[in-house]
Image (spheres, coloured by chain):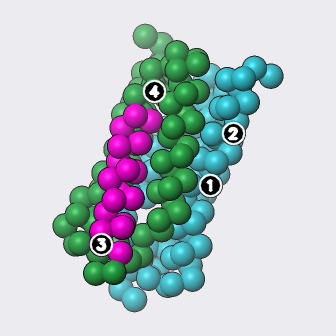
Chain colours: A cyan, B green
Amino acid sequence: MSTAEILGYAAGAMTAFTFLPQVIKTWKSKSAKDISMNMFLIAFTNEIMWLVYGVMLDNWVIISTNAVMLIMSGIMIWLKIRYNHQ
Amino acid sequence: MSTAEILGYAAGAMTAFTFLPQVIKTWKSKSAKDISMNMFLIAFTNEIMWLVYGVMLDNWVIISTNAVMLIMSGIMIWLKIRYNHQ
């Protein structure tokens, strides 16, 4: 595995969990007033595009990273709907 | 330009602006209580790693996307510090 591949997988692994602290914070506080719904709608749409791009390039860094982020942003959209006014 | 490249650039261009709605919302509302600081600290660190990965692969989709996201997450960290308690 090349240095670039190792760095890509490390960056991918970290990036995949970018939204996790926000999911945990919103889950615990039950408050999503300050969160931008558009941010997570854009993220959700993008991650579908990235998944297709990853499949076309057969690049597993891109595929695995965006599969996790798709799930995370889906959860955030649900939390935003659920806790927007609390 | 191949279909994969076009899709990559489109996804990259959209992804670059994922944080923009959050920047605008926080800027206007002056409230960042519900925002996770850790999310943007992880994002900021990641984007530096992605930039290096992009340079190593000479992949301008990855380089340009993450340069914009690095700036956006830097702004969000500043907004979170400034408006956390308002």
**Residue flagged by tag 2: what amino acid is it?**
Ala
Which of pointers 2 and 3 indicates the residue nearer the eye? 3
**Residue flagged by tag 4: what amino acid is it?**
Ile
Q: Secondary structure at mark 2?
A: helix
Report how far apart the C-alphas of labels 3 and 1 lie in the structure. 24 Å
Report which residue position mark 1 lands on: A17
**Residue flagged by tag 3: what amino acid is it?**
Tyr
Q: Residue at x 67, y 23 (%)?
A: A4
Report how far apart the C-alphas of labels 3 and 4 lie in the structure. 30 Å
Q: In the image, is A81 to the left or to the right of A6?
A: left
**Residue flagged by tag 1: what amino acid is it?**
Phe
Q: Which disc number belongs to residue B83?
A: 3
- Res A1 → quadrant: top right
Report which residue position mark 4 lands on: B63
Marks 2, 3 in one chain: no
- Res A6 → quadrant: top right
Q: Earlier in the sequence, mark 1 or mark 2?
A: 2
- B55, A35: nearer the viewer: B55
**x and y percent of residue A12 in the render?**
64, 40
Q: Residue at x 45, y 27 (%)?
A: B63
Report how far apart the C-alphas of labels 2 and 3 lie in the structure. 32 Å
- Res B61 → quadrant: top left
Report how far apart the C-alphas of labels 1 and 4 lie in the structure. 20 Å
Q: Secondary structure at mark 3?
A: helix
Which of pointers 3 and 4 indicates the residue nearer the eye? 3
Q: Which disc number belongs to residue A10?
A: 2
Q: Residue at x 57, y 83 (%)?
A: A28
- Quadrant assignment for the C terminus of chain A: bottom left
Which residue is at the far left?
B28
- A51, B85: nearer the viewer: B85
